[in-house]
Amino acid sequence: MTIDWTFPRRVAVVVLTVGLVVAYPLVRLHDPDILLAALAGCALSTLNALAGFLTIEIAFGKSYTAFLKAILGGMGARMLLLLVALTLLITVYRMHTVALTVSLLGFYVIYLVLEIVYLQKKVVAKNRE
């Protein structure tokens, strides 16, 4: 199995671009709690997106039923893990709630769009074969 590294490269570009755009405003706030929470949200979303990418890569060549089970089951498991992590970070570690959730959801939406585009391109390429 060969891995297509397009998606991880796009994830890296998103992290670097967003990091450059928001670095100055976050540093100007002089609030390390907000910065830490924003970084944690980014990290959680990025790990979630990369786990989704691995699921797609592993399940793509399998039957349609197996593929859907892997994707939907993986999505459910990843959402549950995100919920547990978010709950722990807010209740146990007392992270800044707004910064954490805005960062997590913002990156989640961006990565979800990237994931859909990536999957669509893989399906189109497979159908051309």
Image (cartoon, rainbow, N blue to C red):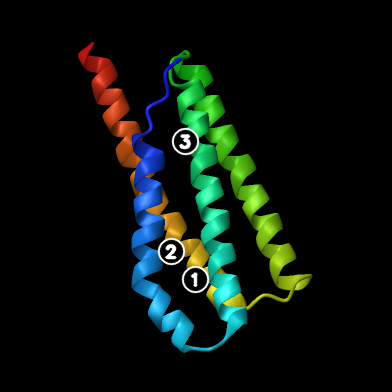
Disc number at residue 12?
Answer: none
Residue underneath mark 2: 106
Q: Which quadrant of the figure contains the C terminus?
A: top left
Disc number at residue 102?
Answer: 1
Question: How many C-alpha atoms fall within 10 Å of the one at disc 3: few (<14), some, or many (≥20)?
Answer: many
Residue 26 screen position, x and y as percent: 46, 80
Residue 2: name its quadrant: top left
Question: How many C-alpha atoms fall within 10 Å of the one at disc 1: few (<14), some, or many (≥20)?
Answer: some
- In this view, the residue in front, 65 or 90, is 90
- Count of numbered marks: 3
In this rendering, is residue 74 above or below 88?
above
Q: Disc 3 or 1, which lies upstream in sequence?
A: 3
Residue 38 screen position, x and y as percent: 53, 70
User: Disc 1 residue type?
Assistant: Val
Q: Is residue 109 left or right of residue 92?
A: left
Q: Disc 2 or 3, which lies upstream in sequence?
A: 3
At x 66%, y 62%, the residue is 86
- In this view, the residue in front, 4 or 24, is 24
In this rendering, is residue 65 above or below 80?
above
